[in-house]
Amino acid sequence: MPRGKTHSAWPPHDGGIGGWLNFRHRAAGRRVWLLRYFIIGLCGAMTSLAHPPFFLTPVIFVTLPLLIWALDGGYERGAKRRLLRAGLIGWWFGFGYFVSGLYWIGFALLVEADKFAHFIPLAVIALPAGLALFTGLALGLAGLFWDPDRPVRIMLLAVAWFLLEWLRGHVLTGFPWHSLGYIWTGNSLLHGGMAQGAALVGVYGLGFFTLLLACLPALLPGDQLKRADGRILMAIIPLSALVLVGWGVWRTQQIVDRSMTDDKPDISLRIVQPSIAQQEKWVPGNRRAHFEKLLQLSQLPGVTPPQIIVWPEAATPFFLGEQPEALRAIGKLLPRDGLLVTGSPRLSDRHMAVAAGEVENRPVHNSILFIGGDGEIHARYDKFHLVPFGEYLPFRSLLSAIGLRKLTNDIGAFAPGPGPQTLRLDRLPPVSPLICYEIIFPAAVTDPTQPPGWIVNLTNDAWFGDTSGPPQHLAQARLRAVEEGVPVIRSANNGISAVISPSGSVLQALPLNQTGILDAKLPKPVARPPYALYQDIPLLLLSFFVLILFTILRKREKNSRNIHA
């Protein structure tokens, strides 16, 4: 667009909110420019209020249109200038979004404040600043093709946002926390219906559709609806949302009805939440007391023991596999065909014996052990997606030189396991075990060649206190259930233990900071949803097609302008 050309998109060049977002007004002083970026950062921070535990969904219909108008107001003729301006707008929005949404990470550094509190600025400022680079790249990519006159620009932004959220979930092991699609994990009928979209397109695709829907108000002012693409978008997107909600409500009810009519025998289970404070968990003198607390919670006098008892991540603050007496005590809890699923640190079996009868230094795994009524370990699983800085130190030689180290120094750096596994145990549906952080990764929670009948997720959110972190963690487990079409059984040391159906509905739960148990039946799985079969491939292909199409159209317009010049 020539520099002197006027356009019909809102906001206007001066006055009101539109004036504040008009970055092309070069007469403004530095303070006004900073204020504009502050407004954009505030919009990002307010967008986090749509996420758990607040679920203030209406805010996105204000903040995301403002983001569109900010891009309109920052439009530049040159591609490089457009990219830089849009990227800076995106970075500020993302910084506000991640600072407000991930503040709770800093609470983990207060567990041992004398050792780690001075790293809080890295967790609550530097990490959001780094994650905001993905938001900046998303808006920069959209800015390359931006045209304030075209309503279809909201489709362009949704595509760019989807691609960069997907990259954020994969680059440098990935960190997909706080993806936009999680705003639909509330308990209302609307939220439940929209959440079923994850069965079709996953959480990234749900974020793509959410952005399209929330940006529609940006098409209302000016002449946007006089264009054909504006009228089409305004008709199709709300209609699609209504269809999705209707189908989602129907799907949820179908899953409920199926669980009531399925004639397969029920499997009884008991989830244990001991709620042990993180400061006390690894104190050597507390080990026996913690273990006995787990045993006491697991058995109810006069009540037939369930088939499955589930303890949380690292429930035993010692190497359970090396303690025959503790294994025998667990065996006494269970019926003959029973099973206890528990988290425990585990010494690797590799290279145990060396010359002169010495034992070589063995790697440590964060593991899940499956222990039978005979007191023997029948199966095990080693966590493969480890938490950076929590379970290992990335770029160790570089970062350790400046004083950084991981939080869990009681055991040492953990070694990763081989990857998602489906374990087959006698008389039980095949299970996919996951530990804590692993549940947050879409399309990476099960072995696609061996689909499980359920997911067991052991976790410990005691690190994060009474913050937004534990509800956000639960929300991600709920959408994994929707995406994979299987129930999720979640046991937290402290956090929110829950029985989650394949529709993502929480059937039973223990709230944060409560000690107790949940007795329940294992929900039945459903047929594998499209997302479990095809993952993000269809939307990735569609996104690249859209970008290629915009590239071709932009090139044709440029050639046309040159011809008529």
Image (tube, grey):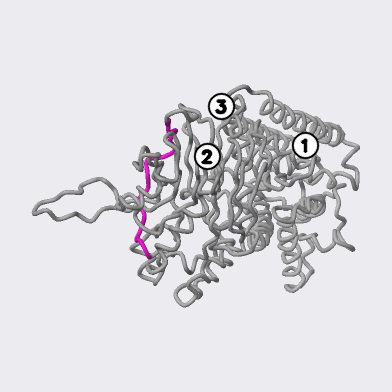
Residue linked to disc 2: 306
Front position among marks 3 and 2:
2
Residue at image location 49% in from the left, 35% down from the top: 446
Residue linked to disc 3: 533
Left or right of 432? Residue 528 is right
Report the disc number at residue 440. none
Q: Farthest residue to the top: give it.
A: 263
Front-lying residue, 23 or 520: 520
Front-lying residue, 339 or 125: 339
Residue at image location 44% in from the left, 63% down from the top: 289
Front-lying residue, 561 or 460: 460
Residue at image location 51% in from the left, 74% down from the top: 117
Magenta-highlighted residues: 410-425
> Where residue 286 appears, x then y in whole percent?
42, 67
Report the disc number at residue 564. 1
Front-lying residue, 22 or 298: 298
- Say which amino acid is labelled 2: Pro
Q: Reading the chain from its start, which is encountered first: label 2 or label 1?
A: 2
Locate residue 461: give its quadrant: bottom right
Secondary structure of residue under mark 1: helix
Secondary structure of residue under mark 2: loop
- Say which amino acid is labelled 3: Leu
- Say which amino acid is labelled 1: His
Secondary structure of residue under mark 3: helix
Residues packed near mark 3 inside 10 Å, few (<14), some (14 to 19) or many (20 plus): some
Front position among marks 2 and 1:
2
Measured in 3D between alpha carbons, the distance from the residue under mark 3 to the one under mark 2, in whole angstroms, is: 33 Å
**Is residue 423 in the magenta section?**
yes
Q: Reading the chain from its start, which is encountered first: label 3 or label 1?
A: 3
